[in-house]
Image (cartoon, rainbow, N blue to C red):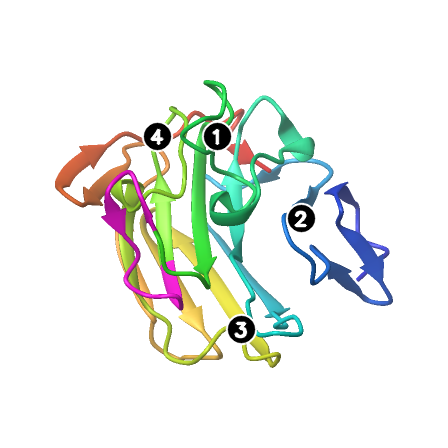
Amino acid sequence: NGTEPFTLNGVTAIQGAKYRINPGTASQKGSFFHTSPHLVVGGFDTTFAFRITVPAGGAGADGMAFIIHNDPRGNTLLTDHAAALGYGAFLTSPAGTGATNAVVVEIDTFAGAFGGVSDLSGNEISIHTNGMNSVDHSENFSIGRLNAPTNMSDNQTHTMRVLYVPGTLSIFYDGAVTPTLSVPYDFGTGGTHILPSTPVGGVSLASGSAF
């Protein structure tokens, strides 16, 4: 709710007990993070609710992301809009635009191809990381993905639980009892990109904490 210690960036605003990340207009971007980093290296379990409305005309895009990071920008991290989902970078963006030291759970509601690799659909959950290096929305950086079980941009409230036990990162969608998506991943040792299957290192966390 609006009393929590969060830092708001871009167009993000508090509306009652909710955070409106973006209004229903084109080319907007916003983010919010806990103002102070939280300990994550030993494991965590968090659940949040989200609702994506479709603007008049039905041309909504591109989604949102749950981001765990130790980027130097800290609680002010906000990168490119649209397909970049506020954490990635366009091909034309300056070097260093994308988030570093980050693990990202994409709620991707627009099908596209970036870096020559296509999304599964316009209703995809995908986990991205590039270790300590800059990461973006290219599916080259995915360590696990699937089509969401239901339409995520249907103007209904959905829930997502993110559970990290060192060695495994799991996503539970809309109250699922078993993981909707589970991937081998460790903040220290990393995981494996799936396109193609190549190892990716872990992230550098300050005293095991991240935003």
Which mark is nearer the camera, 3 or 4?
3
Toward which corner of the image does residue 198 lie, by quadrant? top left
Residue 127: x percent and y percent?
Answer: 36, 51
Which mark is nearer the camera, 3 or 2?
2
Q: Which residue is mark 2?
A: 28
Within 10 Å of disc 1 (Cα), the crowding (few <14, some 14-19, many 20+) is many
What residue is rendered at 40% in x and 33% in y?
135
Q: Which residue is mark 4?
A: 131
Instruction: State the extent of the magenta-drawn residues as a range.
Output: 113-125
Q: Secondary structure at mark 1?
A: loop
Give the mark nearest the N terminus, 1 or 3: 1
Residue 1 counted in the magenta span: no
Give the mark nearest the N terminus, 3 or 2: 2
Give the mark nearest the N terminus, 4 or 2: 2
Which mark is nearer the camera, 2 or 1?
2
Residue 166: x percent and y percent?
Answer: 35, 46
Which mark is nearer the camera, 4 or 2?
2
Residue 125: x percent and y percent?
Answer: 38, 62
Q: Which residue is mark 1?
A: 98
Q: Residue at the top extreme?
A: 95
From what the image shows, is residue 170 above or below residue 157? above
Give the mark nearest the N terminus, 3 or 4: 4
